[in-house]
Image (cartoon, grey):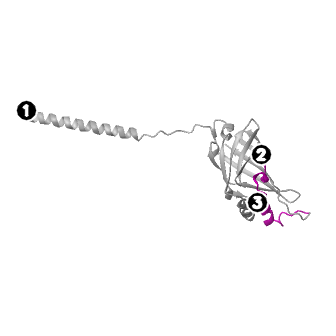
């Protein structure tokens, strides 16, 4: 009889121990569960092929000099169920060091004697705003100044294309422009012998989703 009682007590203890162990495991698993949110947006700028092209001008004949920035970082927004939604309210930054004009000497001069003369301009940053089916504007920060740049745009297939013109004098960058013109004085001379670097820069940006 004593053996039966002792055996019964052992079974109760084992059962209770197993129950506690099982409950702890369940609580641990529940506490460690992490909900993963899936991005359901159809269009994402961070995954798109983005081209940022610009055209500057030299000599009194306004000879175009093309270039591009090879990198852009999307810092906020950039996703949407339509291309317009993905573009609208997007914030971005462009590293100055990513400039590319197919001439390493020119790239160096632009980085050092133009952007390098400005205040805290290792990046160009901004925000895109879509106004209607063809117009928008970008708030662009450069030389510690933020200015509004209107643009026109089209959407054809999966490609967004925008065109705009910046006048760097609006960003108080004339000193930087004069610095660049001084270092490129002979290269920016035209047939009339006058060296000139224009303050307006054309922008053409494409994003293919």
What is the x, y in percent for residue 118?
72, 58
Mark 3, secondary structure of its residue: helix
Q: Was residue 166 drawn as part of the magenta stretch in this picture? A: yes
Q: Which residue is situated farthest in the right direction here? A: 192
> Above or below — where is 175 with respect to 73?
below
What whole-number distance in Å separates the C-alpha atoms at marks 1 and 2?
96 Å
What is the x, y in percent for residue 189?
86, 64
Q: Which residue is situated farthest in the left direction here? A: 1
What residue is shown with label 2? 163
Q: Is residue 125 left or right of residue 199?
A: left
Reading the chain from its start, which is encountered first: label 1 or label 2? 1
Q: Which quarter of the rendered picture does the C terminus lie within?
A: top right
Q: Which mark is residue 176?
A: 3
**Residue at figure coordinates x 67%, y 47% from the top left:** 49
Mark 2, secondary structure of its residue: strand
What whole-number distance in Å separates the C-alpha atoms at marks 3 and 2?
24 Å
Q: Nearer the viewer, residue 62 or 116?
A: 116
Q: Nearer the viewer, residue 8 or 118?
A: 118
> Above or below — where is 168 with respect to 7?
below
**Residue at figure coordinates x 16%, y 35% from the top left:** 9
Region of the chain picked out in magenta, as a range: 163-191
Q: Residues within 10 Å of mark 3 (few under 14, many from 20)?
A: many
What whole-number distance in Å separates the C-alpha atoms at marks 3 and 1?
102 Å
Q: Nearer the viewer, residue 98 or 201?
A: 201
Mark 1, secondary structure of its residue: loop
Would you identify the image quadrant in which residue 156 lies?
top right
Q: Which quarter of the rendered picture does the N terminus lie within?
A: top left
Q: Residues within 10 Å of mark 1 (few under 14, many from 20)?
A: few
Q: Which mark is residue 1?
A: 1
Q: Nearer the viewer, residue 68 or 168?
A: 168
Q: Nearer the viewer, mark 1 or mark 2?
A: 2
């Amino acid at each position: 009889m004593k053996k039966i009682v002792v055996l019964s007590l052992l079974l109760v203890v084992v059962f209770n121990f197993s129950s506690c162990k099982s409950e702890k495991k369940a609580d641990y698993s529940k506490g460690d569960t992490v909900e993963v949110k899936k991005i359901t947006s159809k269009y994402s700028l961070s995954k798109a092929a983005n081209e940022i092209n610009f055209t500057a001008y030299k000599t009194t004949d306004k000879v175009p000099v093309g270039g591009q920035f090879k990198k852009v970082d999307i810092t906020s927004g950039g996703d949407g169920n339509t291309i317009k939604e993905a573009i609208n309210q997007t914030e971005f930054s462009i590293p100055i060091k990513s400039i590319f004009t197919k001439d390493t000497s020119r790239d160096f001069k632009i980085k050092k004697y133009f952007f390098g003369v400005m205040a805290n301009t290792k990046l160009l940053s901004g925000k895109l705003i879509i106004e209607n089916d063809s117009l928008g504007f970008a708030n662009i920060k450069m030389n510690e100044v933020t200015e509004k740049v209107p643009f026109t745009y089209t959407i054809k297939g999966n490609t967004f294309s925008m065109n705009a013109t910046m006048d760097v004098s609006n960003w108080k960058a004339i000193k930087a422009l004069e610095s660049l013109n001084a270092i490129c004085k002979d290269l920016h001379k035209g047939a009339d012998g006058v060296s000139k670097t224009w303050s307006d820069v054309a922008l053409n940006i494409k994003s293919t989703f």
